Amino acid sequence: MRITELELAQLRNIERATLETDSPTVLIGGPNAAGKTTLLEGIYLLLAGRSFRTREATKLIRTGHQNCWATARIGEAFLGASRSADGRPVHRLNAADLSLAELVRHFPVMLLDNSVFALFEGPPQYRRQLIDWGLFHVKHAFYSQWRHYRHALKQRNALLKNASPDPAQIDVWDAKLAPSGECIDRWRTAYIADLSTHCEQSPLLDGLNLEFSYARGWAGETTLPFAAALRQARQRDIRQRHTGLGPQHADLRITVTEAGKAGDRLSRGQKKLAAFAVKLEQLRMYNRQSPAPAFLLVDDIAAELDTDTQRCILRYIETLGSQVFMTSIEPERLAALLSPTVQAQARMFHVKHGCLVQPAHSNP
């Protein structure tokens, strides 16, 4: 599954850009603020249904225009997305409207950029999203369970905001909340165990001695059922007027063996390498279980990483089977780190003042 044609219009500083390629490796070069990351953002908007840089549609739209849009040819499929100034998202596959869940399931995409530092430095929400990305794509029942859980949680929290909530009504929502919460917990626990095994075998993590553990979000981490934990915490929840435990408070804990939290022990470069490696193991897990590989977007790999480390990451990416789009201020130098076979297949484009240019000899 590859993007063979891409067109973006009125997206940030890009007035109109067209890209055609059959290559599994696409390098995007250009100076700072030329629009390299915006090109990746347009691809992400198409495949994931949202921007990875902002939630505000108006920030995506080029000044003086009312909307922005992107289209792509992916195999026999024609995919389109647009955003208007009123924020209304539109996603279409072969001219038919597509829900966000259908879009993401059809066209999985993974992003590697400097936001990966949040794996070690950010709040638990980022690490939950990392786990749930994998579960959404490999466990198809996960999405429906998660929606069921979120609905029950919303209703329970609304009930708790009352001055004197009815215990019988809390029982009703606990009965809906607990089974979904337990199910999500089991799937997350199994997924993290699988991911941990893959990471132990990753050459990119050799010598970092990382350990993974799962904090599921309520007391009695290994034995107490969620329903029992809800009963125990009920009076506290009534006082605080919200549900203070459950999968929505879960976390993935990453430590260095016998040294403590990885976020406190690793250098910036080690954190980026480790975060990239963990996400690439997720990608490998997905690609091995799926009929078509996910797409991979890599923004500014050179930041924080030395040349040898970049080479190791790039050579590892080559083994995964994904079509990859990568940005760099110096794409020729990046291309030199690829294996000769991939270099011969790669295509290079340059972004200048929001315009996309393919050099006469676009092979690196």
Image: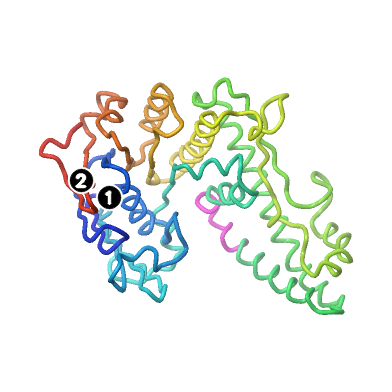
For label 1, count other residues whose C-alpha is less than 10 Å away and answer few (under 14), some (14-19) or many (20+): many
* Percent x, y of residue 83: 36, 69
Confirm whether the magenta stretch covers residue 157.
Answer: no
Where's the C terminus, which quadrant?
A: top left
* Percent x, y of residue 271: 55, 33
- Left/right of residue 193 with respect to residue 226 in the rendered view: left
Residue 88 to residue 286: above or below: below
For image coordinates 77% across by 64% down, the residue present is: 243
Task: Look at the image and give the residue range highlighted in magenta.
Answer: 135-145
Residue 95 to residue 307: above or below: below
Using the image, tell me which numbered label, if any, was put on residue 136.
none
- Left/right of residue 37 with respect to residue 146 in the rendered view: left
* Secondary element type, mark 1: strand
Q: Which residue is mark 2?
A: 21
- Left/right of residue 226 with respect to residue 80 in the rendered view: right
* Percent x, y of residue 276: 49, 36
Q: Which comes before the other along the chain, label 1 or label 2?
A: 1
Can residue 30 be seen?
yes
Q: Which residue is mark 1?
A: 3
Can residue 93 be seen?
no
For image coordinates 44% across by 42% down, the residue present is: 112
Residue 345 to residue 84: above or below: above
Tag 1: residue type?
Answer: Ile
Determine whether label 1 and label 2 are within 8 Å by CB: yes
Please tell me in which quadrant of the rendered image residue 163 appears: bottom right
Confirm whether the magenta stretch covers residue 137.
Answer: yes
* Secondary element type, mark 2: loop
